[in-house]
Amino acid sequence: MDQKELQETLSSLLPGATFNLNPQFAEAIVPAENLHQFALELKNNSKTQFDYLVSCSGLDKDKELMVVYHLRSTTLEHSCVIKVATSDRTNPEFDSLYEVWRAAEFFEREIFDLYGIKFKNHPDLRRLFLEDDFEGYPLRKDYVDPINIIQ
């Protein structure tokens, strides 16, 4: 399946998603309320079979916080990027995809630790790198560290 066919397949499976033209990957921005359902569909559908979560990253785009998932089908040998965003910087929260791809457990803990994004139904959501009493989220653009003079 080439990129165009994959994009068409994804658009039929992900109603409500918006698609960006990306020469390297099929790329979709999905509504947060449908993230878990879409992830299950992408993994279990015979046309996509995205069985491998390559990476999951947090991203601060000033007005919104985003999580970016890079998926791969080891069977069908194609890849895609799924993005989900929220403008709620006070209490950012998405569904955990741990039940879909086990690798999400570590990635989501890292994102929680460094961006403060919470993942509903995560089995062990706690800080990964920083001390439990650390205040703030150092990869957010609005993070201020007066000791190390980071603004």
Image (tube, grey):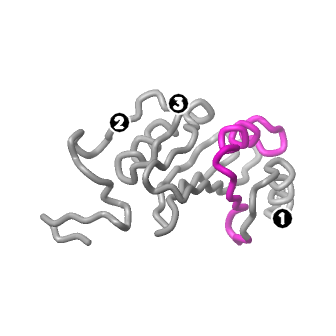
x and y, in percent, of residue 127 in the image: 32, 40
Which badge, 3 or 2, is on the more N-terminal residue? 3
Determine the residue positioned at 63% across, 34% down. 100
x and y, in percent, of residue 56 in the image: 52, 50
Determine the residue positioned at 58% across, 37% down. 97
Per the image, label 2 sits on a secondary structure element best described as loop
Residue underneath mark 2: 126
Looking at the rendered structure, the number of numbered marks drawn on it comes to: 3
Instruction: Provide the residue span drawn in magenta.
Output: 21-49
Q: Is residue 90 magenta?
A: no
Q: Which mark is residue 4?
A: 1
Q: Amino acid at mark 3?
A: Asn
Residue underneath mark 3: 121
Is the residue marked by circle 2 packed among few (<14), some (14-19), or many (20+) residues within 10 Å? some
Per the image, label 1 sits on a secondary structure element best described as helix
Is the residue marked by circle 1 packed among few (<14), some (14-19), or many (20+) residues within 10 Å? few
The answer to whether 45 is drawn above or below residue 67 in the figure is above
Residue 5, quarter of picture: bottom right
Which badge, 2 or 1, is on the more N-terminal residue? 1
- Answer with left or right where residue 74 lies relative to residue 145: right
Determine the residue positioned at 76% across, 35% down. 44
- Which quarter of the rendered picture does the C terminus lie within? bottom left
